Image: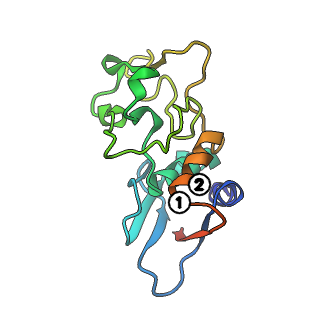
Amino acid sequence: SAINAAIAEYAQKTCIRLRPKKAGETAYLSIFKGGGCWSYVGRTGSKQQLSLAGGCWHKGIVIHEIAHALGFFHEQSRPDRDHFVTIKFENIQDGKEGNFRMHSTSQVTTHGTTYDFESVMHYGGRAFSKNGQPTIVAKKAGVNLGQRHGLSHLDTIQVNIHYGCNGTVVRISLVSM
């Protein structure tokens, strides 16, 4: 399944080990069939919901949503994003502008990594377009914006730095439907 493939990729590339929730555990990730593909950003310390609607059952989308649960925002929301991309707010669907909001350095840490155009956390160039026109335009020619295949090299580096993956294992409990 897409969930198992995502869990396997995190285990292969990072120190994150998603495992079944044990009786009595109160802090865990709860994957359910909800409305849309979403998760809260950051670990909540209690039951944390991660929604996977029908169209979300792809490894890259599950990896993306787990990354949110692990504390990662969208790449195009980095505080330095304006050096790398232009957001075309005039082309974004009404009510979806928040998905493109830039976060401050107090909200987001880049762990010293450069902007990752091919991050699993980066939207494609026409994400949430209301008119078929680009919503994100790279300032560098010839780059692809985003992908949903799996963790990029820089995604992996950021997760490993963020969780101190230096020979340690971080176990996170999981319940999925």
Q: Secondary structure at mark 1?
A: loop
CB-based contact (under 8 Å), mark 2 and mark 1? yes
Which one is in front, 139 or 80?
80
Residue 163 bears which disc, if any? 1
Residue extending farthest top? 141
Q: Position of residue 103 (x, y in %)?
A: 32, 38
Residue 31 bears which disc, if any? none
Residue 65 vertical placement versus 138 (above, below):
below
**Left or right for 26, reference 18:** left
State the residue position of label 2.
160
Q: Position of residue 132 (x, y in %)?
A: 45, 17
Residue 27 vertical placement versus 80 (above, below):
below
Q: CA distance from mark 2 to mark 1?
A: 5 Å
Residue extending farthest right? 12
Q: Secondary structure at mark 2?
A: helix
Q: Position of residue 162 (x, y in %)?
A: 51, 55
| Coloring scheme used | rainbow
Residue extending farthest bottom? 24
Residue 73 visible at all: yes
In the image, what residue type sits under mark 2?
Asn
**Which residue does the image show at 42% across and 21% down from the upper left?**
83
**Which residue does the image show at 45% across and 57% down from the upper left?**
69
In the image, what residue type sits under mark 1?
Tyr
Residue 80 vertical placement versus 44 (above, below):
above
